[in-house]
Amino acid sequence: MHNSKKIEIIGIENIPLIKEGDDISNIILDNIERNELRLDNGDIIVIAQIIISKSLGDIRDLNLINPSKDALRIYQKIKEKTEGEDLPIKEPELIQAILDESKKLIKSSHILITETKHGFICANAGIDKSNVGEGNVISLLPADPDKEADKIRKAIKQKTNKDITVIISDSFGRPFRVGSVGVAIGVSGIAPLLDKRGATDLFKKELKTTIIGQIDNLASAAQLLMGESDEGIPAVLIKGYSYNTVENVSINSILREPIKDLFRSNKEDLIKEVLKNRRSYKLPFQERIVNIETIKKCIKISRWAPSAHNGQFWRYIILKRGEVRKNLIDKMNDKMREDLQRDNRSQQFIEKNINKTRESFLKAPLLVLLCLDKSDLQEYSDAERSRNEYLLGIQSISTCATYFLLSLESKGLAGSWYCAPLFARKEVREVLNLPRDFDPIAFITVGYPKKEPKTPKRKKLDDIIFKIE
């Protein structure tokens, strides 16, 4: 614990304009010496994001960006909203850059509120045009601010033998209040939160919920000297703040989970966004392991899908990569080949159809088979009602699959629904040794998306509402 009753906030002046490849730790230490300052154990250095981004080369030229249809659509929407309001209108190229750096677009107005790839909720994905340089250029947030803070802290420790903390800061706007404040986006050496629960107040009452965002407070304090315009102080030294040194910390610990966020969006907007933004993902996945426990959580949610008689006829089989899955796909492809040959299809047509889905089924991190358990269906004495009961089961499986796909989306996963098992039920049952009453209905490929799928066209409302009486 570094103890003091006085805190000093000192701007590190005369830091030069940063170029790609510059060593930030060396530059800061050189200027601490030039400013005749002393670095002590327990000191905190707050560094503006912009010089980190510049040193990493996280700069983009807007003139080299081609706006997508989505960017042009958002541009037109913003233009219509802000017309006559004396508000700045973002060019399509900047909108595209914001979309490229975002995991999710939360709200679009004269600014775009997005969730960045880091999980930060902020304006314009943290992209900045100020203090970047000449030309139509922008700075992006570093891909891993924690890593950069840790790298600088360790370099300073190696060069000075001083145990310090490094915070990387940026300025964010706030909901319900005007004006930006300094916030931490990367940290090394100090716990992001100071948990005061269990302590007592002046009247000896136990604190039940008090958790202080200490690194954001430190970043805001530093922001008073850093400023937003031509102050030219991108690094600040803080002395005298009492804290415990903590290793292996992460900015992620202060990011509020969406389910606990009371302000992000209302229920209607949230549901609309989830439903409209889900896509069937048929592109390559990231080479990233999908945790089975995460899939179980998604299946747990899918159980709440509506089902006929509340029968809950769905059964899941989760297939990891390996020989079992390969054998299954080979057998199914053999069946497809036989069927298409019987239809007198050309060899080229057959191979094209087989290869269309083969790679997706084999390379997806997980392949989920959804089955209808016919033993839960009601029995009837006549064929027509029995057939209808089976259709009720199929409908129930469909709703369950939809809930499952939406649950995957909520976890940052992507999936696609394939009906291939319908055409090779016997082969699927045999390879996987399924119970006789399990009827294979659908495959769902699961993984972390690597690219953004295209937005599919949808029919107009008048084309699908046939009649209103």
Image (cartoon, rainbow, N blue to C red):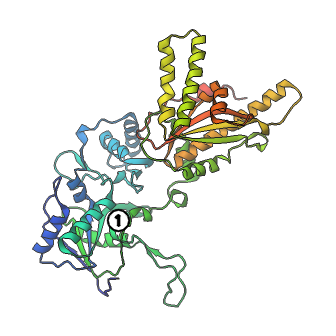
- Count of numbered circles on the image: 1
332 is higher (above) or lower (below) than 417: above
Q: Is residue 236 above or below residue 62?
A: below
Name the amino acid, label 1: Val
Residue 231 visible to the viewer: no
Q: Position of residue 178 (x, y in %)?
A: 38, 63
The crowding category of the residue bearing disc 1, from other C-alpha atoms within 10 Å (few below 14, some 14 to 19, many at least 20), is: many
Q: Residue at x 57, y 31 (%)?
A: 328
Left or right? Give the position of 111 relative to 198.
left
Residue 33 appears in which quarter of the rendering?
bottom left
Give the quarter of the figure containing the C terminus. top right
Residue found farthest to the bottom? 203
Residue 89 image position (x, y, % from top left): 33, 45
Q: Position of residue 289 (x, y in %)?
A: 46, 47
Residue at the spot of label 1: 183
Quarter of the image for the N terminus: give it.
bottom left
Q: Residue furthest left?
A: 34
Query: Secondary structure under badge 1?
Result: strand
